Amino acid sequence: MLTSHGRYPCAPFKSRPDFQWPDGKRLAVYLAVNVEHFSYGEPGGIDLDRPTLPWSQRSWLWRDYGNRVGGWKLLDLFEELQLPVGVIVNTANYSHNPELLEAHRQRKDEIIAHGRSNAERQLDMTEADERTMIAEVTQSLAQYTGQRPAGWLSPYLTPSLVTSDLLAEAGYTYVLDWGICDEQPFWVQTRTTPILAVPYPIELNDQPTIVNRCATAAQYADMLVDQFDEMQRRAATETLVYAISIHTFIMGQPFRLTHLRRALTHILAHRETLWVTRPGAIARHYRALPPDQQLTVA
């Protein structure tokens, strides 16, 4: 028999309980922007067109463009479109470029924990070291934002086998790591209390799409539009989460930003039929639903 994680059952989409988002909406839309920072002189993260081994200054500077320029241009776009976002944050950014994160806080964007740096993989940590890292990140974000983070995405999407357990024990209410496999939230069992998985995109994530699969900015924008149009059609009878994930150093580039604007403008032209929100609000709404409208835990 194959090894199983034992954390949730496979739930065929057509056999699930029905539910709705606020005001009877069927399609929730959120955009997550990743704000990341890496050690100078040490291997870690990705490069634009090759593995980042050995370390190179050019790859570090390419990513730092997002902190110096790209993130601010994205902020302008979010303001232009009146779009709330979730900000997936390495806490190292609070010592490197705190002004960008403060601008997001002033907008009341949601700050989502993303470890200390994407140069660290939880998969490589001992349980004790991972617990210490999660506590450090939680404390730092609470200090800088004035409230504890509710959600977590593991750096470079590499959680360990006990990450969900440690997050539940640390008081997190939702996690994005598991959400790649679904278009609705679902409960994930831990060794204490269940934690909610909120959908998170890997196909509509600019990093694997543009950097790894070499899609152009125009192709990526077309993917965003096509995904939205199909999900909006399905949302006549199904309740769904449409999620986009971008990085400041990728979509913050001017030649890509113009295509992102095109895609988001297309989506938000339907704002009256959508719940345009943040991941934490999705988690809170789902958690508050009657039990018979939620997927059961394994």
Image (spheres, rainbow, N blue to C red):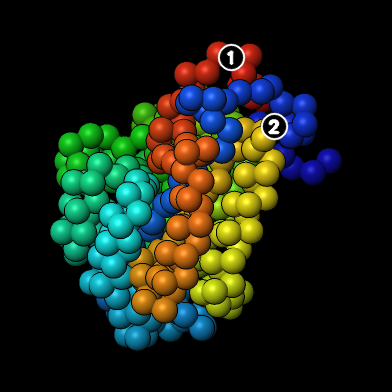
Q: Residue at x 47, y 18 (%)?
A: 288
Q: CA distance from mark 2 to mark 1?
A: 20 Å
Which one is in front, 56 or 84? Answer: 84
From this viewpoint, which residue is outermost toward the right?
1
Q: Determine the image quadrant of residue 291.
A: top right
In the drawing, does residue 15 fall left or right of residue 121? right
In the drawing, does residue 76 fall left or right of residue 295? left
Helix, strand or loop under label 2:
loop
Instruction: Give the answer, above or below, for where 60 lies relative to 190.
Output: below
In the drawing, does residue 4 fall left or right of residue 57? right
Instruction: Give the answer, above or below, for where 209 lies relative to 143.
Output: below
Q: How many marks?
A: 2
| Residue that label 2 marks | 237
Q: Amino acid at mark 1?
A: Pro
| Residue that label 1 marks | 291
Which one is in front, 171 or 186? Answer: 186
Structural crowding at the residue carrying mark 1, measured as other residues with C-alpha within 10 Å and reported as few (<14), some (14–19) or many (≥20): few
Q: Which mark is residue 279?
A: none
Position of residue 27 measured from the top left corner of the image (x, y, whole percent): 56, 38
Answer yes or no: is residue 100 visible. yes
* Image quarter (top left, top right, bottom left or bottom right) of the N terminus: top right
Position of residue 41 measured from the top left corner of the image (x, y, whole percent): 30, 79
Which one is in front, 277 or 86? Answer: 277
Q: Residue at x 19, y 53 (%)?
A: 103
Which one is in front, 170 or 277? Answer: 277
* Image quarter (top left, top right, bottom left or bottom right) of the C terminus: top right
Give the mark nearest the N terminus, 2 or 1.
Answer: 2
